[in-house]
Image: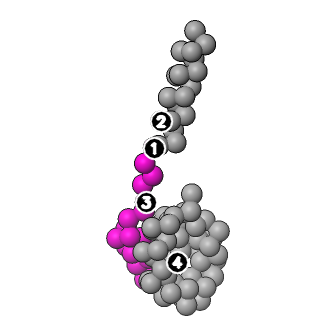
Amino acid sequence: MTLRIGRAAGMIGIMHDTAPRQHPNPGIAYLLWCLVFLGVCGIHRFYSGRWVTGIIWILTGGVFLIGQIVDLFLIPGQCRNPKS
């Protein structure tokens, strides 16, 4: 009986550890970036898992739009290496 429980617990651990992680889609991140034209900055940062800078971007207008423009070049890297 102990062997069965240990084997089942091991299988659950293996299933949990090997679950594939989905990376954010850069196309969707760019679409969310375009919300800057509607007055909303930083939503793309929430999408890529960067909550703290997302809040900063919303409160400062994308750090006075300079950070928002820099993010045009950083979005692919943010989607390859999301924070979770």
Query: Mark 2 and 1 residues: CB-CB less than 8 Å, in contact?
Result: yes
Q: Earlier in the sequence, mark 4 or mark 3?
A: 3
Q: Earlier in the sequence, mark 4 or mark 2?
A: 2
Dot 4 alpha-carbon crowd within 10 angstroms: few under 14, some 14 to 19, many 20 or more:
many
Q: Secondary structure at mark 1?
A: loop
In the image, what residue type sits under mark 4? Cys
Query: Which residue lies under the disc numbered 4?
Result: 41
In the image, what residue type sits under mark 3? His
Left or right: 54 with respect to 77? Answer: right
Q: Is residue 35 visible?
A: no
The residues colored magenta run 19-39
In the image, what residue type sits under mark 1? Ala
The N terminus appears in which quarter of the rendering?
A: top right
Query: Which residue lies under the disc numbered 1?
Result: 19
**Residue projecting furthest to the front:** 3
Q: Earlier in the sequence, mark 4 or mark 1?
A: 1
Instruction: Find out whether residue 27 is within the magenta segment.
Output: yes
Q: Is residue 41 visible?
A: yes
Measured from the top left, where is residue 19 in percent x and y? 45, 44
Q: Secondary structure at mark 4?
A: loop
Query: Which residue lies under the disc numbered 2?
Result: 15
Front position among marks 2 and 3: 2
Query: Could you give the CA–CA distance between mark 2 and mark 1, rounded to whole angstroms?
Result: 6 Å
In the image, what residue type sits under mark 2? Met
